[in-house]
Image (cartoon, rainbow, N blue to C red):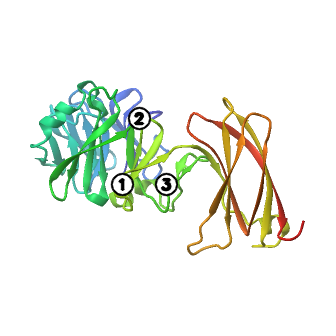
Amino acid sequence: PTTAAAVAAFQTYLLAGNVAGSVRKIQWTNSGVNNDWTTGDAGNLTLFQDPGPIYRLLPLGETLVAYRPLSIHILFFVGSPFIFAQRQILTGLGPIGPRAMASLGERHIYWGREGILLFDGARREHVGHDVFDAMMTAVDPQFLTSVQAFVNQKDREVYFAYPGAGDNGVCKNAFVYNYQEGTWREDAFTVAAAGPWRRFSTVAWNAAVETWAASPFSWLEYVTTTDASPVVLIGTDTGAISFLDTATVNEVGVARVRTAETGLLDVGAKVFQKPGALCTCEQIKVEFEQQGSAYNLEVWVGTQNFLGGNAQITWTQYTILMDGTKQFVDVRQTARYFAFRFQTQGISQPFRLSGCVATFALRGDH
């Protein structure tokens, strides 16, 4: 399919629901091939029961749950020639929005039209009797479908973020359910989007490939294994990124900036054929095109003298005003290994970096 509103990895298949041309259709790929939608085991089925689009496909044990506004369906593997079959579990009731549900591993939890419910694939359990009326009163009724549910594993909590009256559809408050203790509380923050991710050392945006910091794990693990995604990233309506993880007490705002960054370079080996040699970076000439008014381009020089262990890059900032009058900075930084970062402050300050030339000298040899 060219577009789909719901995507999930299940067993050895990639499934797409609410695809272009049919809001009730589910398609799947050939087994083990995530971009082959036409050969082998690839196929599709349509949820004819009840109207409404497919909101979400979410794995649950040996089944895949398809959530719709007025129904819930279970998909299960049956093998060739049909591959998948489906059974409608609930009719007339469903989640209030496409992101109003989350996985707790052996159960799902969702904000439904009749309450907050835990669902194990067969039975539903109400867990929000004491707060549901307050939740329905607090959310702006014209933005019910903007509600988002996400899990904070560290504190065993599920956030139901919602837009209130006057919030223009942006989730600025949340009702929070502790699924270990069975208690509720309220929280306030701004959420435009939220989702899980695994954090290794820092939350970093790799502008070159438009992904979060690279990891040795496959994308399939992130979407199928709850334990592999202990970090919740939160995007705000102002372009900032926050995160909930095992190292922070509460969410921490991280400004989303326009950034290009190199890896760590052994200048001695690449320039002077002397691996690990002590070198001095004297000047950096940057070839760039600003995409708007004149604003500062931050030129960061990272230095490091040892590899491995707990070695850290030390960053020093320099600045070029992108007004066309100057395209270089004098640096005078000495180290064995170097990295370079170029960035502007905010998504409203784009720039095009076509190259840079750094001048180096061996320590004491000019």
Query: Label 3 vs label 1: CA separation?
Result: 21 Å
Q: Secondary structure at mark 3?
A: loop
**Rendered view: 290 above or below 215:** above
The N terminus: image quadrant = top left
131 or 50: which is nearer to us? Answer: 131
Question: SS class of the residue under badge 1?
Answer: helix
Q: Name the secondary structure under disc 2.
A: strand
Q: Which is nearer the N-term, disc 3 or disc 1?
A: 3
Outermost residue on the left side: it is 129
User: Disc 1 marks which amino acid?
Assistant: Thr
Q: Is residue 11 visible?
A: no
The residue shown at (68%, 71%) is 305
Which x, y percent locates residue 199?
45, 59
Identify the mark at residue 4; answer none if there is no mark. Answer: 2
Of marks 3 and 2, which one's residue comes earlier in the chain?
2
Residue drawn at point x = 36 percent, y = 61 percent: 246
Mark 1 is surrounded, within 10 Å at the Cα level, by few (under 14), some (14 to 19) or many (20 or more) other residues, namely: some
- Outermost residue toward the top in this view: 142
Q: Position of residue 231 (x, y in %)?
A: 39, 55
Residue lying at the far right in this picture: please name it.
Answer: 366
Please state which amino acid type lies under the numbered disc 2. Ala
- Graded by Cα atoms within 10 Å as few (under 14), some (14 to 19) or many (20 or more), the crowding at tag 2 reads some
Q: Which quadrant holds residue 113?
A: top left
Q: Of circles 3 and 2, which is in front?
A: 3
Type of the residue with mark 3: Val
- Report x, y in % for residue 181: 16, 58
Give the residue number, with chain letter if any, for mark 3: 203
Q: Is residue 326 left or right of residue 35?
A: right
Q: Is residue 318 above or below residue 55?
A: below
**Cα separation between marks 2 and 1:** 18 Å
Numbered label attached to residue 224:
1
